[in-house]
């Protein structure tokens, strides 16, 4: 091995150049690897650089022999202040050095040694296939370069090997839950029979991507999560990747259509003899019919009928539906290399602790809660400073023993007629597609994303409540609010329920303005439009605000809404007392109960 090392030299580039010859040589090397993957291609690296280049800081290492031929590619990233990693670690299901099997050990050793010479002290290589010759060479490469190495399982990627699948009497693959699939197809296709389509040309794909993005974000919101597609960088990456891969026929956008409507998608690949299930999604209202499962079933069935396809790779993640189809798997590893022995020990201790907690779900949940509280405290300290944070903590502690809160209630039936109206502001009813658009528009506003998750939960669980969003002609979301029946409404500010002031009353609640739109006076116009809609339904609208929420109180009163009464909550440990006082004539009615 040592005798061959002088024959290889490494050239370092800080970008992935737009170079036709490099692309040809790079992709030719991909086909020489033990297990060629679309994630290793030149096009994939270029798409990552296009979307994430500024934050990831590409570090491209090209191995050449004495004849100046390209024999190895290590597409890495060296972000400022962070460890060296695979450039495609956050986008590729598999990451590896691109080199033929015969020279894998030599090239892996040369890459690690070059990183040491460049004074990089920390390397994190994730999604590294366990069966890769380069991974097998890492331990000796790390020791020879003075690194301490630790490796653990990252994922086991489920796969469907078509040649080993059982078949039915009619020669078709014996896939799981086919009775359910047939029932679902009948239910989905009430209006028109469902049809699976596969788009591979950029001219067809690029117009479909916005709908796919919206559906994916909406699906995640429905399941109380934030999709990575809310980030513009991720959408840019997928768009650029489709543009670069489609000329070679490597990109395939599969859809299940029922008439003009698409009910499920898979943004996937067709590379060499493998089809990839990469980023799927489906519409929320058909969840009970499992449209994603149906699409995957049909995709595998079609792959089995194609003699050029050997397997369907289901990618990262251990979802149960994948296990139903899988008859093989491929393990990937999470590998860390540190020059510091202390960092190496910390890495191992962290892994052992996480493994122990994972075996005890209750302990893991408690640990996650503590970490979340610690993160929130650090954020507050950075934002407000030690003095303000201490004052906040003492106030919370004092309030736990004894507190007094006042909530103002406003009659919203007759808003101020002088409140400026605008034909350029539109009131829209909140649904999951609207929430998805709002999430993509406010990807960097953590408070708004948390609010949108709350809206998604309310859409699922509170059918009597209706949400509204104020927008402008550009489609920007300016303000959000909700309306629901006053009767049996739970007031979190009071930890109580109150009798409705009049039959059929509605209460406006949970208003929110994205950070980018604050200070522009959208609160009052939104409430006025919602109140007008409620009045057209013959109902009376009410609003409320904690007395300490000065911006909300100011917005309500500026809009001309009249304060009718206040409700006080007196609390001492586990006991509380509710007192209501009318604004005009303070004749209190009281009730008390244990919390």
Image: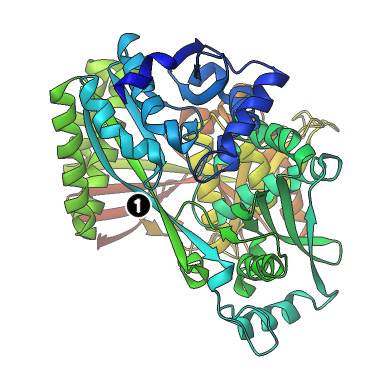
Q: Position of residue 252 (x, y in %)?
A: 72, 50
Residue lying furthest front: 3
| Quadrant, the N terminus | top left
Q: Which SS class for mark 1?
A: strand
Q: Which residue is mark 1?
A: 579
Quadrant of the image occupied by residue 104: top left
Q: Position of residue 438 (x, y in %)?
A: 64, 39
Residue 266 appears left or right of 402: right
Q: Position of residue 84 (x, y in %)?
A: 38, 22
Residue 49 appears left or right of 157: right
User: Foreground residue, 176 or 397?
Assistant: 176
Task: Please tell me which residue is depicted at 85% across the width and 45% down the height of the picture.
Answer: 204
Q: Position of residue 531 (x, y in %)?
A: 70, 48
Q: Is residue 278 above or below residue 296?
A: above
| Quadrant, the C terminus | bottom left
User: Foreground residue, 275 or 1?
Assistant: 1
Task: Please tell me which residue is depicted at 63% across the width and 33% down the height of the picture.
Answer: 28
In this rendering, does residue 584 appear at all?
no
Quadrant of the image occupied by residue 47: top right
């Amino acid at each position: 091995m040592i005798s061959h090392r002088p024959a290889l030299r490494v050239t370092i580039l800080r970008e992935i150049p737009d170079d036709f010859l490099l692309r040809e040589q790079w992709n030719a090397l991909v086909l020489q690897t033990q297990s060629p993957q679309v994630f290793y291609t030149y096009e994939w690296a270029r798409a990552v650089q296009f979307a994430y280049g500024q934050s990831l800081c590409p570090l491209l290492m090209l191995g050449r022999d004495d004849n100046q031929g390209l024999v190895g590619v290590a597409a890495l990233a060296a972000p400022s202040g962070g460890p060296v990693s695979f450039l495609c670690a956050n986008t590729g299901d598999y990451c590896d050095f691109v080199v033929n099997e015969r020279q894998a050990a030599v090239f892996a050793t040369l890459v690690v040694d070059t990183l040491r010479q460049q004074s990089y002290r920390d390397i994190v290589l994730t999604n590294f296939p366990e069966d890769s010759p380069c991974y097998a060479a890492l331990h000796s490469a790390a020791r020879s370069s003075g690194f301490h190495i630790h490796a653990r399982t990252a994922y086991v990627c489920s796969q469907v090997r078509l040649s080993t699948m059982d078949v039915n009497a009619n020669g078709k693959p014996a896939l799981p839950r086919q009775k359910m699939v047939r029932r679902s197809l009948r239910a989905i296709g009430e209006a028109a029979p469902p049809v699976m389509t596969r788009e591979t040309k950029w001219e067809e794909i690029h117009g479909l991507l916005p709908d796919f993005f919206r559906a994916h974000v909406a699906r995640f919101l429905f399941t109380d999560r934030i999709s990575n597609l809310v980030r513009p960088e991720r959408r840019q990456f997928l768009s650029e990747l489709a543009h670069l891969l489609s000329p070679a026929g490597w990109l395939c956008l599969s859809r299940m259509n029922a008439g003009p409507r698409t009910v499920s998608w898979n943004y996937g690949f067709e590379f060499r003899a493998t089809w990839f299930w990469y980023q799927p999604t489906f519409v929320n209202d058909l969840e009970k019919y499992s449209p994603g499962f149906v699409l995957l079933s049909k995709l595998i069935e079609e792959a089995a009928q194609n003699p050029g396809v050997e397997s369907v790779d289901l990618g990262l993640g251990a979802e149960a539906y994948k296990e139903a189809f899988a008859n093989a798997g491929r393990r990937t590893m999470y590998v860390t290399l540190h020059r510091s022995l202390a960092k190496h020990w910390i890495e191992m201790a962290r892994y052992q602790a996480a493994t122990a907690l994972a075996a005890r779900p209750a302990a893991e949940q408690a640990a996650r809660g503590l970490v979340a509280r610690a993160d929130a405290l650090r954020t507050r300290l950075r934002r407000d400073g030690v003095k303000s944070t201490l004052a906040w903590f003492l106030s919370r502690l004092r309030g736990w023993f004894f507190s007094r809160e006042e909530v103002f209630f406003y009659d919203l039936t007759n808003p101020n007629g002088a409140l400026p109206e605008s034909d350029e502001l539109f009131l829209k009813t909140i649904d999951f597609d609207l929430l998805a658009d709002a999430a993509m528009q406010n990807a960097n506003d953590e408070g708004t994303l948390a609010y949108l998750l709350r809206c998604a939960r309310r859409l699922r669980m509170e059918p009597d409540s209706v949400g509204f969003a104020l927008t402008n002609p550009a489609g920007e979301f300016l303000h959000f609010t909700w309306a629901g029946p006053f009767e049996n409404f739970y007031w979190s500010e009071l930890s109580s329920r109150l009798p409705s002031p009049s039959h059929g009353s509605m209460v406006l609640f949970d208003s929110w303005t994205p950070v980018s739109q604050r200070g522009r006076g959208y609160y009052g116009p939104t409430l006025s439009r919602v109140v007008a809609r409620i009045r057209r339904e013959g109902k009376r609208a009410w609003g409320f605000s904690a007395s300490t929420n000065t911006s909300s109180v100011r917005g309500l009163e500026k809009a001309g809404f009249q304060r009718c009464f206040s409700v006080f909550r007196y609390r001492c440990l586990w006991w509380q007392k509710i007192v209501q006082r009318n604004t005009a004539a303070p004749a209190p009615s009281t009730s008390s109960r244990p919390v």
